[in-house]
């Protein structure tokens, strides 16, 4: 068997394998972590398989691959990308390292509220206009379990999708740009008593939304109903209809910063990916 290559989107690789099969090239797919997939072919299919694989890498989201899954894909795919057989720890391990770092820091800061003095932790990470590092640190502050779970879940979900579809550089850009912009906006419009990753989450949402609109030949990064719900939730925050204290200006400017980054992204994608 010859290794054609690896790719970090199991669904896309499965579609490619089904298409290859229609071309007479049988592909064996293997994955140790549930995310990065190896594609193997028999020695006699080396040349044809290499050509098909390169075509796949040039544009992995062509319609012919998804169509092939419907026409010839088998229900018992060896890739368990959505089922219970994929261990949660394996899925977490497969995430980009920066996603895991922010996730871990968020949990540590939240736990510190119950181990140490909460006011001390808050004061240390609170936004301060004359301290540049504090322009970012408020994103690690969460004031309730629901607040924490909501933000960290969306951070991992949208962040990993963006890394897989584009490159880690966009995750870094979105995190730092939206942190600074959303925190400054909330401070200038209200005060410094705020915290949470919501501004960054809305930046990821805005980026994913615009990216999906600009690349309609690819599967959506985020569905329209989800975008609608998140936008509606943001609007309700400004009305204070639910009597919930939210950093509404951070949400809005986080969303706008993510949209801006998406519009500045070159429309032509490449198969190059950062590590």
Image (cartoon, helix red, strand yellow):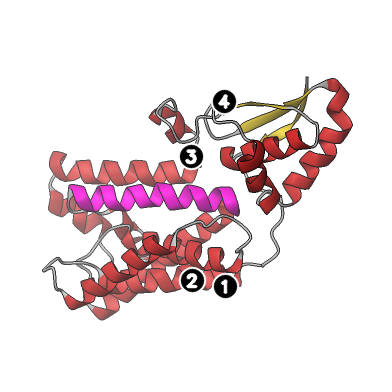
Cβ–Cβ under 8 Å for marks 2 and 1: yes
SS category of the residue bearing label 3: loop
Taking the spot 39% from the left edge, 47% from the top edge, the residue there is 102
Q: How much space separates mark 2 and mark 1, taking CA atoms?
A: 6 Å
Q: How much space separates mark 3 and mark 2, taking CA atoms?
A: 23 Å
Q: In the displayed structure, would residue 215 be above or below residue 166?
A: below
Q: Which residue is mark 4?
A: 78
Taking the spot 55% from the left edge, 50% from the top edge, the residue there is 163
Taking the spot 13% from the left edge, 68% from the top edge, the residue there is 242
Q: Earlier in the sequence, mark 3 or mark 1?
A: 3
Q: How much space separates mark 2 and mark 4, taking CA atoms?
A: 37 Å
Q: Nearer the viewer, residue 36 or 223?
A: 223
Residue extent of the magenta highlight = 145-167
Q: Which residue is mark 2?
A: 259
Q: Which circle, 1 or 4, is nearer the viewer? A: 4
Q: Is residue 210 magenta?
A: no
């Amino acid at each position: 068997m010859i290794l054609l290559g690896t790719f970090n989107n199991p669904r896309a690789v499965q579609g490619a394998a089904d298409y290859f099969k229609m071309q007479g090239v049988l592909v064996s797919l293997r994955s140790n972590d549930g995310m990065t997939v190896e594609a193997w072919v028999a020695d006699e299919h080396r040349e044809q398989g290499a050509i098909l694989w390169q075509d796949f890498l040039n544009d992995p989201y062509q319609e012919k691959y998804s169509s092939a899954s419907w026409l010839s894909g088998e229900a018992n795919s060896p890739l368990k990308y959505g089922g219970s057989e994929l261990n949660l720890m394996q899925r977490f391990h497969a995430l980009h390292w920066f996603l895991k770092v922010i996730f871990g820091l968020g949990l540590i800061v939240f736990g510190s509220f119950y181990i140490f003095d909460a006011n001390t932790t808050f004061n240390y990470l609170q936004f301060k206009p004359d301290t540049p590092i504090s322009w970012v640190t408020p994103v690690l502050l969460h004031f309730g379990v629901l607040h924490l779970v909501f933000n960290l879940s969306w951070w991992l979900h949208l962040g990993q999708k963006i890394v897989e579809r584009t490159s880690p550089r966009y995750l870094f850009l979105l995190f730092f740009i939206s942190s600074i912009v959303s925190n400054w906006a909330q401070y200038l419009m209200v005060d410094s008593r705020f915290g949470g990753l919501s501004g960054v989450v809305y930046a990821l949402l805005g980026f994913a939304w615009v990216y999906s609109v600009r690349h309609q030949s690819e599967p959506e990064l985020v569905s329209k109903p989800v975008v609608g719900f998140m936008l509606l939730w943001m609007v309700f925050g400004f009305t204070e209809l639910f009597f919930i204290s939210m950093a509404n200006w951070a949400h809005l400017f986080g969303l706008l910063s993510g949209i801006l980054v998406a519009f500045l992204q070159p429309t032509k994608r490449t198969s190059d990916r950062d590590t």
